[in-house]
Amino acid sequence: MNFPTLIIEIICLLASIYLFFQVSIPKYLKLFPFFMFITLTVEVSAWFFIKYKWNVTLLYIVFTSFEFMFYLFIIAFSIYNLKARKIILWLMTIYPVLVLLNRMFVQQRSFHTITYSIGCLLVVAGCMYYFFELFQSTHSVNLVKEPAFWICSGLLFFYCCTFPLIGLWNFLPGLPDIILKNLSYILTCLNILLYSLFSIAFLCKIQFRRSIR
């Protein structure tokens, strides 16, 4: 965790609270404030773990697994095709089993790059289907006022970019410090973009009244 990421996560958490005051917002999106609170708690906990030189691998394995399941749940209810929704929900329930098996028999002492990569592919595939369904829609949609559009845009870009980076995470410690530092900057920028788009999604339905003279 670094300061810019912490700030954008706090801003995103505050923006997500506004969802409780929106009547027209889908109920599943109102889970985001709890998710953002958990995210912030995990990041702060990881900072303390690192400060006292405790291993954070298991913490991030559990959190990223939960994160993928949550995002798949959000994507599932952002699409209209019931068959596709059931497939995504089915994959969401299978995913933690894959993580557990990977932890027990394959990557027992390292970060779960294999199942993390699988999670990236699942989220990206779900987002791509959302956009496919959106482009096939017979009625016009105001994308600026569509929370799911901003959420899926953020997830698609974030996981397309982090897939090759985090997927090779176990090989990064051997790289020169300057490369690791640059990769850290890239991750920070991707997190800022992701949570910025989430914040837009939470606030995009705000109605601004024009003053009449």
Image (tube, rainbow, N blue to C red):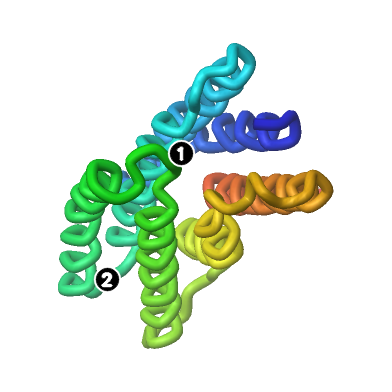
* Residues at discs 1 and 2 in contact (Cβ within 8 Å): no
The spot of residue 143 in percent (x, y) is 54, 69
Q: What's the distance in space between the residues labelled 1 and 2, CA to CA? A: 21 Å
Q: Which residue is mark 1?
A: 19
Element type where label 2 sits in the image: loop
Residue 80 circle label: 2
Eye-nearest disc, 1 or 2: 2
Three-letter residue code for mark 1: Leu
Residue 127 circle label: none
On screen, residue 81 versus residue 191, left or right, reads left
Q: Earlier in the sequence, mark 1 or mark 2?
A: 1
Three-letter residue code for mark 2: Tyr
The spot of residue 121 in percent (x, y) is 40, 67
| Residue beneath the point at 19% across and 68% down | 87
Q: Quadrant of residue 138?
A: bottom left
| Count of labels in the image | 2
Q: Nearer the viewer, residue 139 or 192?
A: 192
The spot of residue 67 in percent (x, y) is 39, 44
Can the viewer see residue 51 in this picture?
yes
